[in-house]
Image (cartoon, rainbow, N blue to C red):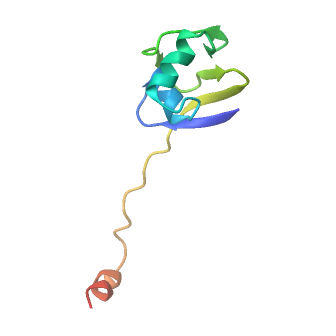
Amino acid sequence: MRDVPIRGEMIRLGQLLKLSTLAGSGGEAKALLESGLVSVNDAPERRRGRQLRGGDVVRVRDEAVRVCSAPPSQPPDDEGDGQEHRRERQ
């Protein structure tokens, strides 16, 4: 099982299927759901709009992914002396 980081607290199932590459497109995600091949936390799921949160496990056939929160982005390092910028302009 691999982790799929998301931005924010929630992602819809159809979006996660594409983000995780379990589905190559929105149409493929819809077809997977309609065919009953998708489960969330070991329960069959057919709703493309199902909201997923960190820790939810999505399985398609024999492949599974776990939703996890993305680490917060780090702010730019402002402690430098600015030399890099002056060198770039020369």
The correct choice, above or below, for 19 with respect to 37 in the image is below
Residue 27, given in percent of the width and then of the height, sits at 46, 23
**Residue at 61 percent of width and 9 percent of height:** 36
23 lies left or right of 37: left
Q: Nearer the viewer, residue 88 or 9?
A: 88
Residue found at the far right of this picture: 62
**Residue at 42 percent of width and 55 percent of height:** 74
Question: Residue 89 appears in which quarter of the rendering?
Answer: bottom left
Q: Is residue 40 visible?
A: no
**Residue at 52 percent of width and 17 percent of height:** 31
Residue 71, given in percent of the width and then of the height, sits at 50, 44
Residue 26, given in percent of the width and then of the height, sits at 44, 26
The correct choice, above or below, for 42 with respect to 4 in the image is above
**Residue at 55 percent of width and 29 percent of height:** 23
Question: Residue 21 appears in which quarter of the rendering?
Answer: top right
57 lies left or right of 27: right
| Count of residue discs | 0
In the rendered image, the quadrant that contains the C terminus is bottom left
The correct choice, above or below, for 85 with respect to 2 in the image is below
15 lies left or right of 40: left
In the rendered image, the quadrant that contains the N terminus is top right
Residue found at the far bottom of this picture: 90
Q: Is residue 30 visible?
A: yes
Residue 37, given in percent of the width and then of the height, sits at 63, 14
